[in-house]
Amino acid sequence: MLLMKEDNKAENKNEGDQKSLQHIAIIMDGNGRWAKLRHLPKFAGHKKGADAVRGVVETCAELDVKYLTLYAFSSENWNRPIEEVNDLMGLLQIYLTKEINELHEKNIRISFIGSRDRLSDNIIKLIDDAEEKTRDNKKLHLILALNYGGQEEIVNAARNLALKVKDGSIDVEDIDESVFSKYLYTGEIPEPDLIIRTSGEQRLSNFMLWQAAYAEFVFQDTLWPDFTKVELCDAIDEYYKRDRRYGARP
């Protein structure tokens, strides 16, 4: 395994923009299975998973990755048992209360994508405060996908564009991929170069369906609570072995 040595960084940089890695997105999967294997309640898995979040954020900052998107809570996760949903929302409140000052001190910006419907007023207030406090930070942009669904995101973008066409702000002929992407939750955030999914599952699960068009995928068997710098660097090393052609010939 390569841990992104300086000589490797220089070599990768010389390969040009096709290889540059500025945005990593992660589908954090396996908290429940991690707890089950240890005969622990699911909450223990989610709590341990929160520790893994802290580690991956620190590692991305160390490696000068500029954007990190984490799939924290999908729009489908509301279908889980109410006790588990409450535990997840409780952990989110703890994270937003205790971690934001440290993120701010480390020059890390945090923002959220997804619908804020169904979120409690308290969580929305914590989200607003966190985004406002860290909005000018430059070291790393951490994006949490919360109450997020990729299909819903695309539908919302289409609906908002339709309203713009209806009121004459935009001509139908002017709508292309670039224009459409600006109406997604991610807005001006660059599309992910690398998408990692843990726990051995190999699907997107309604995550960044539009943005993933040309991302490289790395699927790992590691359960999310056991995800460390080693697994992250393994995925990055795999990314740099790929030939990103974007549909063209080499």
Image: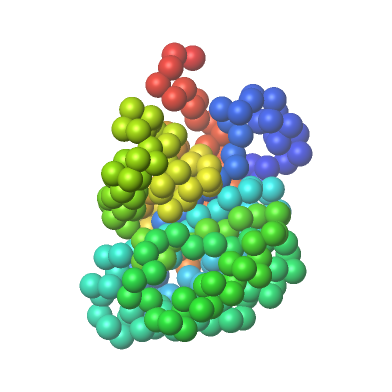
Left or right of 238: which side holds 88?
left
Whole-percent x, y for residue 225 in the image: 48, 68
Task: Check the picture and name the quadrant holding the N terminus.
Answer: top right
Q: How many marks?
A: 0
Q: Image height check: is 107 above or below 46?
A: above
As rendered, which of 93 and 88 lies closer to the eye?
93
Whole-percent x, y for residue 58 in the image: 66, 61
- Residue depicted at x 58% and y 30%: 19
Asked if residue 110 shows in the view, the reply is yes
- Residue depicted at x 45% and y 59%: 113
Left or right of 75: which side holds 169?
right
As rendered, which of 125 and 229 lies closer to the eye?
125
Colour treatment of the image: rainbow
Q: Image height check: is 242 above or below 100?
A: above
As rendered, which of 32 and 101 lies closer to the eye?
101
Left or right of 66: which side holds 6?
right
- Residue depicted at x 52% and y 58%: 143
Asked if residue 39 shows in the view, the reply is no
Whole-percent x, y for residue 242 in the image: 50, 30
Q: Image height check: is 202 above or below 31?
A: above
